[in-house]
Image (tube, grey):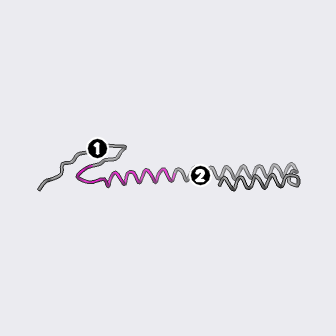
Amino acid sequence: MDVPRRRWRFTDECVESEAFGRSHCLSSTLRRSQSRAREAERKEAMATGRYEKVAVMLLEDSLRLGLWPRSRRWVMLLDLEITALR
């Protein structure tokens, strides 16, 4: 019976072994991928919050300045643009 020799390769915090397969490597890669996905979701949520704040500020300013009756079309276009950015 031939016993497999352990040969290790270290790549990106990932340990691969011919004797044990790549299970550790795959789980490590999956963890990093999930971490990147969570970070991207957090950044997207922050960006969406910023867009909403800007939209509210623009609308409040236009109402305060009395521009609402004259620029409804402008506000509607801004609203469409914000919706498209989401």
Q: Position of residue 5 (x, y in %)?
A: 18, 48
Q: Label 2 amino acid?
A: Glu
Q: Which residues are magenta?
A: 17-38
Q: Quadrant of residue 2?
A: bottom left
Q: Residue furthest left?
A: 1
Q: Quadrant of the C terminus?
A: bottom right
Secondary structure mostly seen in magenta is helix
Residue at the spot 24% in from the left edge and 50% down from the top edge: 18
Count residues near mark 2 (Cα–Cα under 10 Å), then give few for <14, some for 14-19, many for 20+.
Answer: few
- Is 56 within the magenta? no
Where's the N terminus, which quadrant?
bottom left
- Residue at the location (37% across, 43% down)? 12
Residue at the spot x=69%, y=56% of the render? 83
Distance (Cα) linking label 2 and label 1: 36 Å
Label 1 residue SS: strand
Residue 28 pos. (x, y %): 37, 51
Residue at 77% in and 49% down: 58
Q: Position of residue 75 (x, y in %)?
A: 79, 53
Q: Amino acid at mark 1?
A: Arg
Left of 35 or right of it: where is 74?
A: right
- Residue 42 lies left or right of residue 5; in this view the side is right
Q: Is residue 20 left or right of residue 51?
A: left
State yes or no: residue 29 in magenta.
yes
What numbered label is drawn on residue 36? none
Q: Write down the residue under mark 2.
A: 44
Counting every numbered tag in the picture gives 2
Which numbered disc, 2 or 1, marks the residue that appears first in the sequence? 1
Secondary structure state at the residue bearing disc 2: helix
User: Residue 74 at what x, y percent from top left?
Assistant: 81, 51
Against 37, residue 13 (above or below) is: above
Which residue was labeled with disc 1?
9
Q: Residues within 10 Å of mark 1 (few under 14, many from 20)?
A: few
